[in-house]
Amino acid sequence: MARLIWAEPALNDLEAVADYIALDNPAAARRLVARVFESVERLERFPHSGKRPPECRRSLYRELVVAPCRVFYRVEGDTVFVLHVMRAERLFHRFLLDERNRSQ
């Protein structure tokens, strides 16, 4: 089983998305956070189950889509590093992944 490590910025990203949703529907925000954590926890058993993001197909990064979010991560040996969470409709910025990857 792979070890799962959340980068602090990724947790902050998820919290920001949840806070925005909670403005209109706190219960939906709680459900989203639970779904994201459940989906990410599956990476402990299946670390390569996410797809390569279309914006960076030739990279180490992978993503899970947990609507309305995209969760970006990379696998290194038996460790999964969760690096970034964003709303799916937002513009993707690869430099964020690269910066967070260097800080791990």
Image: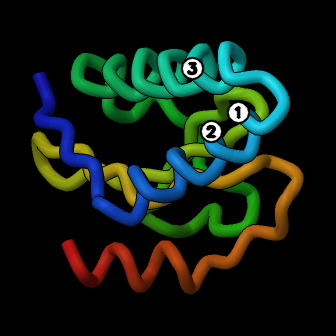
Q: Identify which residue is drawn at 59% across, 40% down.
A: 51
Q: Amino acid at mark 1?
A: Ala
Query: What residue type is disc 2 on?
Result: Ala
Question: What residue is pinned by disc 3?
Answer: 30
* Separation of marks 3 and 2 at Cα, in angstroms: 7 Å
Residue under the image location 19 percent in, 38 percent down: 4
Measured in 3D between alpha carbons, the distance from the residue under mark 1 to the one under mark 2, in whole angstroms, is 6 Å
Q: Are marks 3 and 1 in contact (CB under 8 Å)?
A: yes
Residue located 32% across and 32% down the image: 47
Q: Residues within 10 Å of mark 3 (few under 14, many from 20)?
A: some
Examine the image and state in which quarter residue 43 appears: top left
Secondary structure of the residue carrying numbered label 2: helix
Q: Name which quarter of the figure residue 3 lies in.
A: top left
Residue pointed to by mark 1:
22
Image spot of residue 91 (x, y percent) = 83, 69
Residues 48 and 103: in front is 103
Amino acid type shown at disc 3: Arg
Considering the numbered disc 1 on the image, is that residue within a helix, a strand or a loop?
Answer: helix
Please tell me which of labels 3 and 1 falls first in the chain. Answer: 1
* First in sequence: mark 3 vs mark 2: 2
